[in-house]
Image (tube, rainbow, N blue to C red):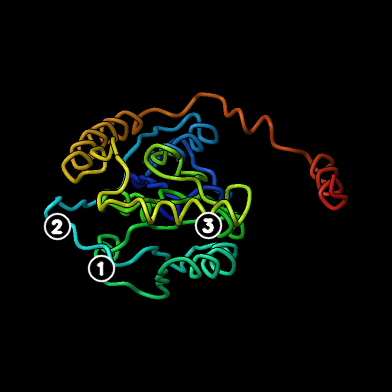
Amino acid sequence: MLLERLKGCDVVYFAHSTGWGMTMPPEVPILCVSRNTMAYWGRYAPNSYIAHVPNIVELPEASEMMHRDVDVLVQARKSSRYLLERLVPALREHCDVTLLDGWVEDLGAWFRRSKVYLYDSLEHWADVGATEGFGLPPLEAMGHGCTVFSSVNDALADYLDPGFNSHKLRVHSLAWDVDAIVRAVLAHDGSGMVCNGLEIYAPAQVTARLASVLQGVERFFAFTATTEPDIEDIWAQRKPGTLQRAKRAVRLLAGV
């Protein structure tokens, strides 16, 4: 509806989470906050101008690291029922768990105090019917020296590498998760796991990338002002008809 009202204007769509059922006309460039989001729009808007511009992540200097008096840190926001109702109570029998429920003025300060950070957003996004667009908290936690246990859904897979810079959460059983997390708490030496590749999220890197992308967007708008799109829409040819939609509804209701 908004795009209809903005016809005749140069509009850029900055895409975070996906799966909302929207379509984008080829006249609208799409800037994607993650490679996962870029892959989605590369599939469903194949005729569009698409580029990758990640979020900025402010990371501390080593001298800013603090004494870690919190064994395990959890945020209630976006957390799964498994994490809040089963894993947190089980962990409290073995170590200190701090649960943040509500607005936090300086989350980075909590990361610098914590040994392990838990993040499990899959259930939240499955309930919403969309995807994790970037997954900022685990990335910030890694940069602040936390050992991260996380789901690896959607854009989290952009930077999480279980077994190398993080650990996969919800593996096999509650007992496995508890054992792995307690081991990580006991083994934490104050630095967390080795996190390579975070420099692409630094302010200077993102600023330079955005400047380059916007130059391309300006050329795009200048060129398309006098030309019409003429590449066939492959998805228009694949839209299901009434009969196909009815058959799909029957299969869903039957659980097939």
Separation of residues labelled 3 and 2 (CA atoms): 30 Å
Image coordinates of residue 70 in percent, x first then y, are 33, 66
How many badges with numbers are in the image?
A: 3
CB within 8 Å, label 1 to label 2: no
**Between 62 and 239, which is closer to the camera in this rendering?**
62
SS state under label 1: loop
Image coordinates of residue 210 in percent, x first then y, are 24, 40
* Amino acid residing under circle 3: Val
Kindly indicate the quadrant of the structure image that contains residue 108: bottom left
Q: Which residue is found at the position 37% from the left and 47% from the top?
A: 14
Q: Nearer the N terminus, badge 3 or badge 1?
A: 1
Q: Which residue is found at the position 51% from the left and 69% from the top?
A: 93
Kindly indicate the quadrant of the structure image that contains residue 216: top left
Separation of residues labelled 1 and 2 (CA atoms): 14 Å
* Amino acid residing under circle 2: Glu
Q: Is residue 110 left or right of residue 79?
A: left
* Amino acid residing under circle 1: Asp
Q: How many residues crowd mark 3 within 10 Å: few (<14), some (14–19), many (20+)? A: many
Q: Residue furthest bottom?
A: 102
Image coordinates of residue 94 in percent, x first then y, are 47, 66
Q: Which mark is residue 89?
A: none
Residue beneath label 1, please?
A: 106
Residue beneath label 3, please?
A: 178
Separation of residues labelled 3 and 1 (CA atoms): 28 Å
Q: Which residue is found at the position 21% from the left and 52% from the top?
A: 58
Q: How many residues crowd mark 2 within 10 Å: few (<14), some (14–19), many (20+)? A: few
Residue beneath label 2, please?
A: 64
